[in-house]
Amino acid sequence: MPAVPPSVPPAPVDPEAVVAALRAAGCVFAEDEARLLLSAAGGPAELAVMVERRAAGFPIEQVVGWAEFRGLRIAVDPGVFVPRRRTEFLAGEAVRLARPGAVVVDLCCGSGAVGAALAAEVERPRLHAADIDPAAVACARRNLAAAGGTVHEGDLYEPLPARLRGRVDVLVANAPYVPTDAVGLLPAEARDHEPRTALDGGLDGLDILRRVIAGAPDWLGPGGHLLFETGERQAPAAVAAVTGAGLRARVAFSGEWHATVIVGTAAPA
C-alpha cells in the first residue's frame, strides 16, 4: 500500500466510524465493505490508507487485494481488471465442458480468475493463460502458480506456445465487450481504475472478440470448445461470427447472474 498522504485525517478505528466514512463517500454497501476493510487491515495506519483509497473510488477488491470467485480468493493488484461475479457463469460453463487432463487456455486472463476456477474444479488440467497487460500477467502468475499454470504476456494468441495449436480442448476468453461509446457510462471505479484495454471492445463491443473467434479454429482440437462472455444484445452478431468461423454455436444465459455466454464447438475428428 502507498504511504498515507499528509492530507489524510486520522484513521477511523471502530466499525461505526468506518461505515460512516464509506457512506459519506457514497459507498452503497458501506456496512459490508467496512467489515472487509477491518478484517484486511493490519492496523490503524493501514486501515486509514484503505478507507482513503476506497473513499477515492478505488474498487474494494483492489483495496483489500483480493476478490471472491467461485469460492476462491483471487489476488487482485492495483490497476488490474477485477473479476466480475457474473463471469462465474462463464467459468462454470467451461468447467462443465472440460474433461480430466484437458488442455485449457484462459485468454485475456486478467487476474487469472477463470483459469484458477478451472484448475480448482477440473482434474489435472494443462493450463495456459495470456494477457497483453504486464500488471495482469504478474497477478495471474501469482494466482495460477499453485495450479502449475503457465501465464504468457502478449496479444491474444501471439504469445501461446506453437505446440498448443490444434490441441486446445477448452478456450475461454473473457475479452472486453463494452462498446467504446459506453465505456464512459461505466461506474467510476471501473473506468478510472481498471485498464481501458480490459473494458473497451471497440465500436460495437465485438472488435476483440471477432479476433478471438477468427483465431480459435487454428488452436482448438477436434471437438474443442471456445467460450466467451458478451452482452445479451450482442449475442446474435457474436453467434454469426462463430458460425462464420466454422464452429457450431450455442448461447447460454443465466438469469441469476444476467450473464450471456457464447459457446463455439469445433467439429469432432
Image (tube, rainbow, N blue to C red):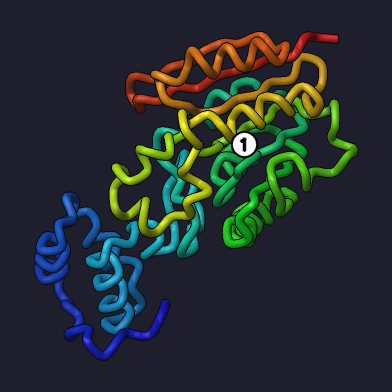
The amino acid at mark 1 is Leu
Q: Where does residue 222 sit, x and y in percent of width and height?
A: 81, 16
Picture residue at 61% right of the left edge, 11% below the top? 249
Picture residue at 62% right of the left edge, 27% below the top? 210
Whether residue 78 is visible to the viewer of this picture, yes or no, is yes
Picture residue at 38% right of the left edge, 64% below the top? 64
Front-most of residues 95 and 140: 140
Crowding at dot 1, Cα within 10 Å, few <14 / some 14-19 / many 20+, comes out as many
Whether residue 148 is visible to the viewer of this picture, yes or no, is no
Q: Is residue 76 left or right of residue 112?
A: left
Q: Toward which corner of the image does residue 192 lie, by quadrant?
A: bottom left
Q: Measured along the vertical axis of the image, is residue 146 above or below residue 64?
A: above
Q: Where does residue 140 sit, x and y in percent of width and height?
A: 61, 54
Q: Toward which corner of the image does residue 263 lie, by quadrant?
A: top right
Front-most of residues 142 and 156: 156
Q: Secondary structure at mark 1?
A: helix
Q: Is residue 30 left or right of residue 253?
A: left
Q: How many marks?
A: 1
Q: Where does residue 118 sit, x and y in percent of width and height?
A: 62, 36
| Residue holding disc 1 | 118
Picture residue at 37% right of the left edge, 85% below the top? 3
Q: Measured along the vertical axis of the image, is residue 77 above or below residue 95?
A: below
Q: Measured along the vertical axis of the image, is residue 255 above or below residue 154?
A: above
Q: Is residue 168 left or right of residue 122?
A: right
Q: Quadrant of the C terminus?
A: top right
Q: Where does residue 233 sit, x and y in percent of width and height?
A: 39, 19
Report the residue that reaches farthest toward the right.
Answer: 163
Q: Is residue 57 left or right of residue 108?
A: left
Front-most of residues 112 and 117: 112
Front-most of residues 219 and 245: 245
Q: Measured along the vertical axis of the image, is residue 76 above or below residue 205?
A: below
